[in-house]
Amino acid sequence: MRIARITGTATATVKDPKLSGLTLLVADIVDGAGKVLDPAVVVADACSAGVGDLVLVVSGSAARVAARTGGLPVDMVAAAIIDHIDIRA
Amino acid sequence: MRIARITGTATATVKDPKLSGLTLLVADIVDGAGKVLDPAVVVADACSAGVGDLVLVVSGSAARVAARTGGLPVDMVAAAIIDHIDIRA
Amino acid sequence: MRIARITGTATATVKDPKLSGLTLLVADIVDGAGKVLDPAVVVADACSAGVGDLVLVVSGSAARVAARTGGLPVDMVAAAIIDHIDIRA
Amino acid sequence: MRIARITGTATATVKDPKLSGLTLLVADIVDGAGKVLDPAVVVADACSAGVGDLVLVVSGSAARVAARTGGLPVDMVAAAIIDHIDIRA
Amino acid sequence: MRIARITGTATATVKDPKLSGLTLLVADIVDGAGKVLDPAVVVADACSAGVGDLVLVVSGSAARVAARTGGLPVDMVAAAIIDHIDIRA
């Protein structure tokens, strides 16, 4: 999984029918200190995240295993809002 | 998922039979401001996108979950035409 | 998917039994102008491609959906011979 | 698979229900000599690893094949604690 | 797929039970001339490869399709020992 900071939203009217009702969040993949590693991914919201939140991004077929996105054509979901990252080593 | 700008098309006569009838679009993966992050991917059209459109690209096995490309040998589809990206953070 | 130029072949005698009979092609992932983006991938041939051909490479589990490679342990196939790439934007 | 050094932990209260009870470890992907190749991935613990441990990271759908994480929305697990890496060539 | 040179081995006592009995090989992903493109991946042996061998690495869910690693939590296998790479273009 990856740590990401939600930076915005994307809206789409013309889309695959199974994407209807999903919230599409734009996010930057970051490291434990917030440094951007990979910018501007789009994640489906599976944990009621909002702009500014630090989230856990689950990618690949696992994105279709989350409760809110089961069976949908998505390859990245925000599956958890990260409360705290504790780097000790 | 990724944001991409459609830049052109690819045509192929000799191909896997399941690819028949699919529109193959060439696209650049971009960030929220349009900067190219990864050039020249090929996506199957699943949302009637055309050259110049900004689209949502779904990759991996999720590409076979979209309505128009179910069960086809594709690993990237344009699943939505992006109307607007709102970056706030 | 990706655009690739076939540059050679690979041969293997000792191999997983399901790989028997497959043609293994060495290819460079390129952009629309032929610039190498990622060198020296190995793709299973699913479209009778040969050295010098520009092909459409399908990756991941989708490689096992192509007609010639169904159920085989391959993660990249040449699924089509590209006739023409038309970049307009 | 990849070699990774566990550097910390991540905690999340608001999350997909299937993530409940999982330990989320932050890790750096490293080479055989410990050089960081890719920082700050998050792996689900499937081998009772802790901070400082060198682990084997399994990614993609294989992460849902490990005994402790079967069927969960995770794309990376720490599947083994590496005792020793022997580089000879 | 990718070409890789086996450079060593990894050993693990504490591990997911399904990894028992597998040989874990450390390898560098290389191009056709042997130049390292991506160092220090770990592959499960599915073709009796050893240190110094040039192998074909199959990644992703396809790694669970090889005869020796079916259903195991692995995402990369050495599926063939490469005898010869012939680059002509």
Image (cartoon, coloured by chain):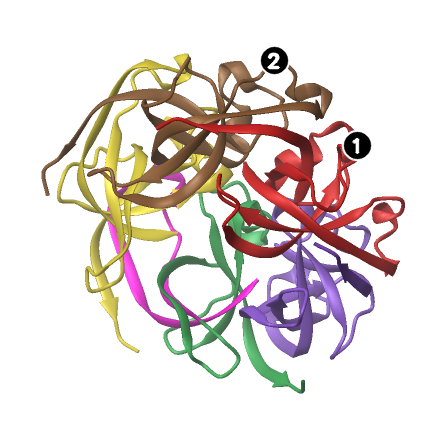
Chain colours: A red, B purple, C green, D brown, E yellow
Q: Which mark is residue D21?
A: 2
**Residue to which mark 1 is pinned:** A68
Q: Residue at (57%, 62%) from the top-left corner?
A: C1
**Observer-nearest residue: D53 or A76?**
D53
**Observer-nearest residue: D68 or E34?**
D68
Residue A62 location, x and y as percent?
63, 34
**Observer-nearest residue: E84 or D32?**
D32
Q: Residue at (31%, 36%) from the top-left corner?
A: E43
The quadrant in which the C terminus of chain E is found is bottom left
Magenta stretch in the rendered image: C1-29
Say whether residue E54 is magenta.
no
Say whether residue C11 is magenta.
yes
**Observer-nearest residue: D38 or C24?**
D38
Q: Is residue A21 left or right of residue E53?
A: right
**CA gap, disc 2 and disc 1:** 19 Å
Q: Is residue B80 visible?
A: yes
**What amino acid type should be assigned to the residue bearing mark 2?**
Gly
Please identify the quarter of the rendering in which residue B52 is found. bottom right
**Vertical placement of residue E14 versus D4, above or below:** above
Tell me the chief SS of the magenta region.
strand
Q: Is residue E71 left or right of residue A62?
A: left
